[in-house]
Amino acid sequence: MAGDRAEQLHRTHFGRASDARAHASGRVNLIGDHVDYAGGSVLPMAIALSTHVAIAHAACDDFVSEWANETAGDARWMRYAAGVLAEFRVVGIAVPPVTIAVASDVPVGGGLSSSAALEVAVARAALAITGATMTPRDLALLCQRAEHIHAGTPCGIMDQWCVAHALPGEAMLLDCARLEWKPIMLPSALEIEIVESRTRHNLSDALRDEWREESRDKSRDGGYAARRADTEEAARMLGVALLAELPRARWREIDELPERIARRARHVVTECARVHEAVDALAANDLTRFGQLLFESHRSLRDDFDVSTPELDAIVEAARARGDLGARMTGGGFGGSAVVARIKSRESR
């Protein structure tokens, strides 16, 4: 298990046992991608895969901490972890110098919130070693700030909020503008499979979407930041604070925007509507309609938001050909994973 691996890594790398351990689950978003930063609602759920942290006091006099990760060769993860400790100190929680070892089952770049799981696990470990307390709400917001400021990814709140609040297997409807949420029961006959595309994204690295011609103009934050900027520009041009606030009666105004901005805006407003329709379909046990909404969401993310990849498209089309209920890419895009919805076999119910 990842928890045992983190502890063993700490003993091997630092020569001593940890003083505390913590973990956080990854998440998969069933529907509602690229709408959280536009003030929309999303439908994520926590998954069983998790990130574990072993932490101990370090023998040094300043705030320099030491890190060990079982995945060698990529130190970029330290920006997320160190950023969390820095943000704790900003809010007055004096995290001492520490040694931290990290082990995770959440695939990096798989669209399953590996960064949020790392951030929340490190935050929980820091709270454990300091004896401080923090509500899940404040913890999620602190981890979001750490990703913005220290990792350079202008993410919405969905990932950190779900990871900090939900139990594995629990779906939630989250209003990202008001930070209000409620658990959503999934029908017992519904099976959700996560399928990796075997292409990895890095939402703060423009190189991850070189296969798209438009990637030549990306900022260092890559396509994610560019999509967010387009969404905010659409809101500005339409005269609303958040694009998700645009009433349906005004959707026709989207057609008057510049072509690329119009496509981004069209995805956001229709995706927000799909989230609520999906929740209604689940409540009514209408799994056929739920699956159709997943296919519609993928088409919108592919055609209007330009964040899918050929590998993700192939997964979705294979699910359609098999007669599955529905499928869509999940997460920020540019690689990662897809979710496939189907009816459980009688043997697995």
Image: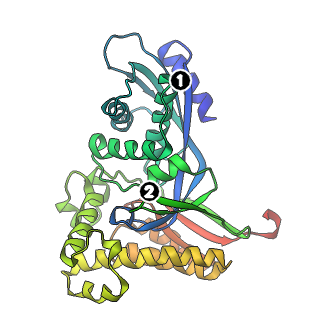
Give the residue pinned by disc 2. 158
For marks 2 and 1, give the one nearer the viewer. 2
Crowding near pointer 1: few (<14 within 10 Å), some, many (20+)?
A: many
Q: Does the rendering let one see residue 305?
A: no
Crowding near pointer 2: few (<14 within 10 Å), some, many (20+)?
A: many
User: Which quadrant would the N terminus be assigned to in this image?
Assistant: top right
Residue 269 percent location from the top left of the image: 37, 77
Q: Is residue 43 above or below residue 262?
A: above
Kind of element beneath mark 2: helix
User: Which quadrant would the C terminus be assigned to in this image?
Assistant: bottom right
Q: CA distance from mark 2 to mark 1?
A: 30 Å
Q: Does the rendering let one see residue 64?
A: yes
Residue 62 percent location from the top left of the image: 31, 15
Q: Give the residue displayed 56% in from the left and 43% down from the top.
A: 50
Give the residue pinned by disc 1. 9
Q: Is residue 239 above or below residue 171?
A: below
